[in-house]
Amino acid sequence: MLKVLFAVSVWGGSFIATKIALRDAAPVTIVWTRFGIGVLILGLAVRLRGAYRRPGLRDLAYFALLGGLGITFHQWLQSTGLITAQATTTAWIVASTPVFMALLGWLFLRESLGPVRLGGILLAAVGVLLVVSRGDWRALSLGRFGTPGDLLILISAPNWAIFSTLSRDGLRRYPAALMMFFVMGFGWLFSSAFFLSGPGFADLSHLTVDGWAAVLFLGIACSGLAYIFWYDALQAMPSAQVGVFLYLEPLVTVAVAGLMLGEVLTPATLIGGMIILLGVWLVNRQMNGMGRKG
């Protein structure tokens, strides 16, 4: 249980750490540095556990697809979105990911939704609209959908749902740490192309002490240890029991964002967030606990 609490707590703090690092460096620099550290930690864990085995070419292509989707593109969406989106808003929106997983299961895997899950999807949608509009429904009617960053974060939620759905097959055939090592490795390689052709190594010199602390936290705790602990917990506990802990993640973000970033929690955002969690709970009652924001 302590491993799950650690993972959820640091993931809840990841949005705050990203916003702090964004004060100094470009989004791609943060993604590249963070996941470079994460790959090293996962590789070390795989080696120490003696879990390494060489995948075939077909699986390597599969891992490359997952890395591009779940690391390179997903993290670009979130880190770029956090330039203008609040950490608190981001956490509530990302919490809606299981809703998109349920919709994907219904569309492509012929999984049943039923009236309860449909109601949960509608509730979560209302909650997301309430969060991004901050209670200003008139702004939505005029086509003003929060900040540009809010829109990118909203896109990241179904993107992670697609990544999680596609990952199911690999997780049945590979140890989680080994699979994530390859997925994260490919994602880091793809992000290297954007990093080297963009800001490059010179951007690392812009990182202050706070910026480096944030990046190291993201790399070591969020992209390395948290993934290992999360999947260790899934192997030791029922997935539904582990998945319940994800409801704590946005609450951690709210608390830490208020302390470290001075973000004000408005009643509309709080109510919208609670509605999202209620909707996700209704949807998630029959789903497993493997999904995560990345």
Image (tube, grey):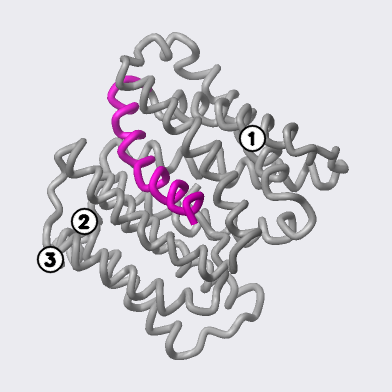
Q: Position of residue 55 (x, y in %)?
A: 84, 42
Residue 200: say if magenta.
no
Q: Earlier in the sequence, mark 1 or mark 2?
A: 1
In the drawing, does residue 73 fall left or right of residue 152? right
Give the residue type that dot 3 points to.
Answer: Arg
Closest to the camera, between mark 1 and mark 3, is 1
- For the record, the magenta segment spans 1-25
Identify residue for label 3.
Answer: 138
Q: Residue at x 43, y 87 (%)?
A: 116
- In this view, the residue farthest toward the front is 2
The residue to which callout 2 is attached is: 144
Secondary structure beneath dot 3 equals helix
**Location of residue 131 by image quarter:** bottom left
Within 10 Å of disc 3 (Cα), the crowding (few <14, some 14-19, many 20+) is few
What secondary structure is found at the residue carrying circle 2?
Answer: loop
Who is closer to the viewer here, 243 or 273? Answer: 243
Q: Is residue 20 magenta?
A: yes
Q: CA distance from mark 3 to mark 2?
A: 9 Å
Which residue is the site of mark 1?
42
User: Label 1 amino acid?
Assistant: Leu
Query: In the displayed structure, would residue 37 be above or below residue 154?
Result: above
Side (left or right) of 177 relative to 160: right
Question: x, y percentage for residue 35?
Answer: 55, 31
Disc number at residue 77? none
Whichever of labels 1 and 3 marks the residue nearer the N terminus, that label is: 1
Q: Residue at x 50, y 89 (%)?
A: 114
Dot 1 alpha-carbon crowd within 10 angstroms: few under 14, some 14 to 19, many 20 or more: many
Q: Which residue shows up at 52% across the image and 73% down it?
A: 103
Q: Position of residue 76 (x, y in %)?
A: 46, 38
The answer to whether residue 169 is above or below residue 105 is: above
Q: Earlier in the sequence, mark 3 or mark 2?
A: 3
Q: Main secondary structure of the magenta part?
A: helix
